[in-house]
Image: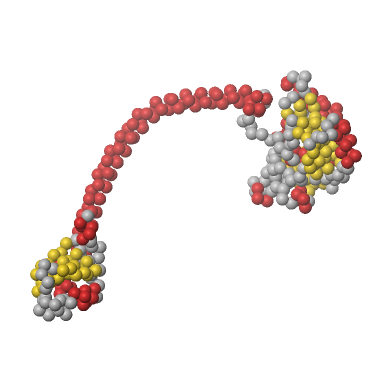
Amino acid sequence: MSTVSNLLKTITKLWPFANQTSSIQPWVMTAEGIKLLASRSEYELVTLESPTLILPRKFLFYQCMDFESVPRALRKNLLAQRVRQFSPFNNPASWQVSEGKSALVWFWDSERVVRMHHEQDLPTLSVVPETMLYPALEKGLRLQPCIEGWELQYWVNKLLLHSRWFANKPDAREQADFVRVCGATEDEYWIEGSAELLSKPWNEKAFWSKENLQSEAVAPRLVLGIFLAWFCLQLGLGLGVQIKKAFLSASVATKNHRLADVVKQRDGALQQQEFNQSVSALVDAPSQLHLVAQVRSCLASLDKFMILDWQYQRGQIAVVLQQDNLDTRALIEACNKNPLFTDVRAEPGITPNQSRLVFSLPNAVKEANDAQ
């Protein structure tokens, strides 16, 4: 096979319903075939980003390979050779994670996966080792429950140096034997992992990361392509500015001329609107003849009175009334019954038999405000 590791990373084609992320369920390959992972009670809440064929740890082989003395250009071929060397399968497939000068490699029987796809008429799914869906550990020993069985792991600087799978939870003797084989100290940090899966492999990184730009062979070409595209864009923008400059200047001048006409028309419309509002206010206001009649009706209960002065200004009527022994309280009560006036008050006049009555109309400006 060609480089199976890189091929598997690109197998991300989804079935037609893959875009409906609200109901996507991951898949798991077991001894009985392939089934939904949600059928396991402990994984009921697990939802991956896309339909995924998860290879359980029991079907995987693992090796941490050191390439410290191997040039980067030769690592790809050497990795394929070592996978074929360590694998008991005729056509192994693998998943590789590069961490510095080391490679974490999981490999399995690719023919089994292909055969199950054909026999069960399955859609094309992403193939991911189960271990990649558990978070990496910075340093220490971890007892990780798996979809089927348990896995003992030994991590150093985010490198999985040793891994061993058990069908049942390993006892103290088996754990001590694993610690002895991997060379960990007796007081090494222990942790028991959770069964919750990640939504994507733990090593998945952003494409435009510093590590990718430095390590991926395609990065220099992409950078050169981006530079050429940027240069062509700048050249095109410069020519475009020169070509469009005259056209935009003429267009702006035309629009400014039209805008000046619109502003002029708007100002005229506003002036006309203010004039119409003033006229409407004058037309809607009651006439003085009507006000005199209303005041006269309020004073109908008085006998032998004399109006000495009449003033109407800013919604108020001031009447100077003369009568001997004028009952101002009864007069105010009688005047307040008229709905035309909002307020009626009496003020003393110049002589004892004179009173100044002030009638307020709606929206009247108080005399106190006038004083201010």
Relative to 368, is 165 on the left or the right? right
The x, y position of residue 275, in whole percent, is 21, 54
Residue at position x 63%, y 27% in the image: 210
Q: Quadrant of residue 125?
A: top right
Relative to 59, is 289 on the left or the right? left
Image quadrant occupied by the C terminus: bottom left
Relative to 230, is 326 on the left or the right? left
Residue at position x 20%, y 68% in the image: 359
The x, y position of residue 177, in whole percent, is 89, 35
Please tell me whether residue 326 is drawn above or below residue 191 in the rendered image: below
Relative to 211, is 156 on the left or the right? right
The x, y position of residue 142, in whole percent, is 79, 39
- Residue 106 visible at all: no
Image quadrant occupied by the N terminus: top right
9 or 245: which is nearer to us?
9
Residue at position x 72%, y 26% in the image: 100
